[in-house]
Image (cartoon, rainbow, N blue to C red):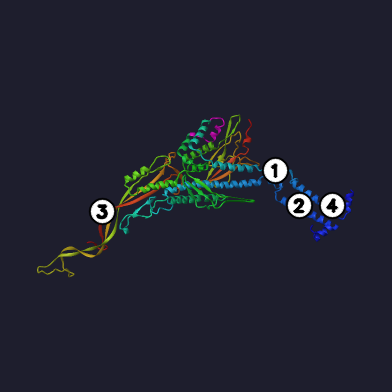
Amino acid sequence: MTTPTKPMKLLSGNKRGMDYYVFIVSLVGVLMLSFITFSLFTKQYSLSSGLSTGTEQFRVLKTYAAAEKALLFADDAARLALEQAAYKYGKSGFYYSGAPCGSNGGYNYWAKDEILQKNDCVPQPANPSGCYPDEPMMKWTLSTFFYYDFYKFVSKFNSISEVKIPFNYEPFGVATGSTQIIGISKDPITISIPNVKYEVKPGFRESINRDLIGDGSSVVAVAKQLAGKSEKEAKKIVSSADSSDAGSLDWNEKFAYSKAKNSCLYAIGSCTCCETIETCEEYEFDEEGNPVLDDDGKIICKKKGTSEVPVGDGTEYRTIPYDSFDIPMSVRVNDPASGTSHKQYLVYDEAAKKEVLKELEYNFAVNWIEDHPEDSTTSCSCGTGHPC
Amino acid sequence: MVMFRAMLKSRKGLDFWDIFFYLFYFLVAFIIIFLLNIAGCVIKDKEARAGIGADVSLAAVIRADAQLDSYLRTQMPGKEELLEKMGWVEKNKNAKYIKGLVKEIDFNFGKVEDFLNKHPEVYSDRDYSGFISGLHPFYVSGSKKDKEDSERVFKAVTAVMFIRAVIDYPKKGDYMFYLLPLGVDFGPSDLKPSSKEDMCKSSYELCAQYLPPEVVPSLKDPLIYVSPVRFSSQAIQIIPLADATLAKVEFRYYPEFKSRLPQP
């Protein structure tokens, strides 16, 4: 049995102490209950505050509805942006900022030869590593076009809406099959009102029913067969790739094959240059055999002639004629249900400044050069005078 | 009694002050517990009624928001299904509770079918929101025919997709059809809902509605809110257009619609 402490002895052993003990317990109890009551009453809205039942809950639901509007807009914008990006992707020949082999008339070259003086007029590929786009390039091009188009829509929404869609996404992913673009937002849409903070990330997954990357690979595979072929052979290759089935690629309608003659010249050495000067073939003499002089004291020339005199070296050039072949192609997608029988998307035409329906086209060009050294000629180029 | 006196007289028993403090303590505890259990017992009748009631109009606005969202996310049916639905309306266009709707939406099956055949890109593989943005280039093309076509097609497609029916009215097996108002404003200057009751006449470029006069009497250009009555709840949504402008879509929900129906 424990020994009571001194204060406890005073309280419990003494009659007067017992009086105080009970008083203290009562007082502490009353204070504690009062504190609990006060806390409880200040945590709730009183009924006289005028707020009806469920007001707070409705405010939360309204917040959710406001966020849903922004999410719906993001989904719609992603869909529109994907369609516009699909059109630009095909139009640009799967290159966002121009093909390494250059372009001509709006068609990016996937194969291009060059024939240069510095290379002794031997035809060579303009880009030794080639310019046929591969699948990573196609995906990057599509996602880059998408990025800028999607940003335009989101900016417009944010300029007019109180709820803002943050534009801070992980790099957009492109899934193949039915082309799908996936947006994973790093930042959430945040809606803050008194006592409520709601956050939701505006991610999306939008698709169009066309395998753009697969189409690209098919087009590239056929394009690789075209370079170096005669017109007849090229047409045959294109015809075998062509189909009129719904959803297949239409190769034939915009087939063009052009051939341009040109020549290249390069220096092969030096040559002698001459100048034509005037000479006198016959001077005038008098009856005594003396030369007749003019007023200046010069012998009068009875018969003039010309003579070639060397004046130095020039450069000898060899000229090689060549043919430059171009096949610009515009491959479309068959869609019998469409008004034009080809797949179309609604896009914004920057030049016309309006929305128009445009056919999805995969545009590219291949170029190669065939030189004819057997028909080459040589010539001498003189800075002063002419070739002797 | 003897024991009680003994307690009072004994040094270790209870005295008067002990009993007083105990009584006081339990009295206070009792009062507090009593107060906690009957919170609100001192408020006025009017305050109690307001507190127990719920804000129905707020609930209706939330319902309108949710319904508009679901409309806009509805996948467009294919051409065959759309034309089949329109064919049904065409077939029944003279039926008692359809002809008012047909007249209101200026339904012309041939012209609508022609447009849908020529322009599948407007609805193919799209949701309803995409359909609206697909109509925009026709509406703003500058051609009067294109504009009229887009208005007509909007009304017809909206009607066949979202028309509702009250069954067993006025007699068993019969239907009363109605179409809650849906309006589109291209390039809006603000996002405020229309202040007019009849938004199709006053506010919107593309608009479709059919509210049978038996249920919603046609009033002459009333405001949406005439104190203390609000006729309908409004929801607004913004959708993007291909030229990076916006369209405002407004939807009206009538919470008391069915209750207004005259009983058979």
Spatial separation of the CA atoms under disc 4 and disc 3: 134 Å
Which x, y percent locates residue A19? 84, 56
Question: Residue beneath label 2, please?
Answer: A33
Q: Chain of mark 3?
A: A
Badge 2 crowding class, 10 Å Cα cut-off, few under 14, some 14 to 19, many 20 or more, is: some
Question: Residue beneath label 4, please?
Answer: B19
Which x, y percent locates residue A26? 80, 54
Residue type at tag 1 = Ile
Q: Secondary structure at mark 1?
A: helix
Question: Residue beneath label 1, please?
Answer: B52
Q: Is A21 placed left or right of A196 in the picture?
A: right
| Magenta span contains residue B127 | no
Quadrant of residue B174 in the image?
top right
Do the residues bearing badges 2 and 1 touch, measured as CB atoms within 8 Å? no
Spatial separation of the CA atoms under disc 4 and disc 2: 20 Å
Report if residue B190 is visible in the image. Answer: no
Q: Chain of mark 2?
A: A
* Tag 2 and tag 1 share a subunit: no
- Image: magenta residue range: B94-109
Q: Is A55 placed left or right of B201 in the picture?
A: right
